Amino acid sequence: MAKSERRRQIEGMVLYPIDWLEERSGLVGGVKYFLFRKVPGDLGWAHTLGSATLTAFLVQAITGVILAMFYKPSPDEAYESIQHITNDVDFGWLVRGMHRWGASVFIILLFFHMARVFLYGAYKYPRELNWIVGVFLLILGMFEGFTGYLLPYDQTAYWATVVGINLNGTAPIVGPFLAQFLSGGAEIGADTLSKFYALHMLVIPGAIFALIGLHLYLVIRLGVTSPPWSPEAAGRDRGAPVETGRGRRGLVRPGGRGSANGQ
Ligand code: HEM
């Protein structure tokens, strides 16, 4: 059936900005490729853990920005500003609760995702680099939790940070420098709090965003692995008979997915 003139006009109006952007950036094609790329047919729920971790991180980023609009990083005002957020600001209790509990959700999902990658052998050739990027994400995620814990500046926050800094101080060689850097002086005070705040809301999330970008680029470039019980599991050649005796091909003679003989 022929399209009505009105419909064609509306379609033109909607498509014009999209075409404009695509012609000048190729972004629309990139997004289409990301959303409609092929993945193995035998993926399951365990493969959604990476996206779940990403969602948890985005929730932290959004709720964190809202909290930063009301939080005051000074020893005299930090605790009061958190009380103000919880008791007076509209939905402040909800945003703060989501950020506080969301931090645990993020770390738990991070570990579940890492366990899935480990148990499925998805860290094997050619995805070792993505595993290494993941290790940095894990370390940064833990540091994000550590720096955020001081911010309410109550007794728990203060003493937990004392323990954390002293623990770091016991590391060989770098320990004392690390402890000195973290506390920013002889004891925990105003400098420590503003340093932790800057790390917590600028430096570490910025680094995590950048590394997630690299992580997802590698996921898209290399493709997602099938489960280990699949004929197309990580490290196995498509169509090649399963080798016995010398270990599977992917472990001893790396071959890319789909390569006939690992050359
Ligand atoms: C902020 C933290 C992280 C985010 C947002 C994230 C996100 C993702 C996503 C969306 C995928 C593709 C889907 C999936 O396999 O679930 C993925 C795959 C992968 N991730 Fe992560 N990840 C994070 C942390 C980690 C950590 C800590 C490790 C390991 C130390 C890791 C190692 C990998 C590997 C090796 C793959 C490829 C798996 C495959 O091809 O099957 N990731 N990640």
Image (tube, rainbow, N blue to C red):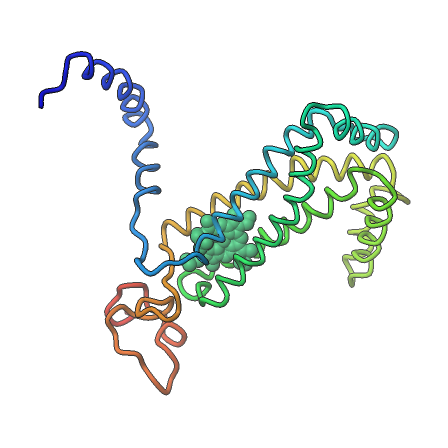
Residue at the outermost right position: 186
Of 65 and 126, the residue lying toward us: 65
Tally the marks: 0
Q: Is residue 77 left or right of residue 57?
A: right
Q: Using the rendered view, name the quadrant where residue 232 is placed.
A: bottom left
In this rendering, does residue 129 appear at all? Answer: no
Instruction: Identify which residue is drawn at 76% across, 44% down.
Output: 149
Instruction: Identify which residue is drawn at 79% across, 37% down.
Output: 152
Horizontal and vertical percent position of residue 26: 31, 32
Q: Is residue 150 above or below residue 240?
A: above
Horizontal and vertical percent position of residue 130: 47, 56
Instruction: Identify which residue is drawn at 76% across, 57% down.
Output: 174
Instruction: Identify which residue is drawn at 30% across, 47% down.
Output: 37
Q: Is residue 232 left or right of residue 200?
A: left
Of 79 and 201, the residue lying toward us: 79
In this rendering, does residue 154 appear at all? Answer: yes
Of 2 and 123, the residue lying toward us: 2
Q: Using the rendered view, name the quadrant where residue 195 is placed.
A: top right
Q: Is residue 159 above or below residue 126?
A: above
Quarter of the picture holding the C terminus: bottom left
Residue at the outermost bottom position: 245
Q: Using the rendered view, name the quadrant where residue 93 is placed.
A: top right
Horizontal and vertical percent position of residue 54: 52, 45
Q: Is residue 239 left or right of residue 185?
A: left
Horizontal and vertical percent position of residue 22: 30, 27
Quarter of the picture holding the N terminus: top left
Q: Is residue 226 above or below residue 100?
A: below
